[in-house]
Image (spheres, rainbow, N blue to C red):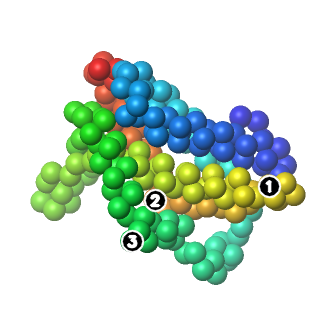
Amino acid sequence: MAGDRNGQPLTREMAELTREFCRLIESAGERRDPGWLREVFTLLPRLHVAVISLHDTRSQTEEASDPENWPGEEHGHLDALDDRFEFYSRLRSDLGEHDGYWLEFDPVGDAHDSMSGSLADDLADIYYDVREGLARHDAAEAADPAADAIHFWKRSYRLHWGQHLVDAERHLYSLKARNRLGH
């Protein structure tokens, strides 16, 4: 990915990868083929590189005064929670035995005896966050290099979906290493 001064090629790359990711996640139940998870496995690292390559032109001061402190605030709307849970449940069902995994961590005492994760939860949270950034990108005027979308993607990555991305990448790598990605 080559960038330029205003970051537009990087922004377009992020938007295209987001579109590809959203199409892939939305088609999970329809496809029912073993290649679906392999495609997710190869797409997530590309999405990861794209988001960390973006340059956010907003300063920390602007960010602190932003009324939208948490970029995922829309996740809290009650009417959207049912849709999100239904989407997560569908993904979880589609993933079957590939969904659950144990988190790797450095435990402090007995507080974290059995921490586990869900690939469906990771993918759903990534999906909703990057899709919101894509909506902002698509709404941007041609003169604006989608600064709002870039800011949203970068901030929501740092505060929320970045951890889901890393967890999903690690779990998918584990499945691939055990030759279980396409089954």
Name which residue type carries label 3. Leu
- Tell me if residue 78 comes above or below residue 119 in the rendering: below
- Please tell me whether mark 1 sits on a helix, a strand or a loop: loop
Q: Are discs 1 and 3 less than 8 Å apart at CB?
A: no
Q: Residue at x 63, y 52 (%)?
A: 134
Instruction: Identify the secondary structure beneath mark 3.
Output: helix
What is the number of the mark on residue 160?
A: 2
Mark 1–mark 3 distance (CA, rounded to whole Å)? 32 Å
108 left or right of 52? left
Q: Which residue is mark 1?
A: 145
Camera-nearest residue between 15 and 105: 15
Nearer the observer, disc 2 or disc 1? 1
Name the disc covering residue 48, or none: none
Q: Quadrant of residue 32?
A: top left
Amino acid carrying mark 1 in the image: Pro
Ranked by sequence position, the earlier of labels 2 and 1 is 1
Foreground: disc 2 or disc 3: 3
In the picture of the structure, the residue carrying the numbered disc 3 is 78
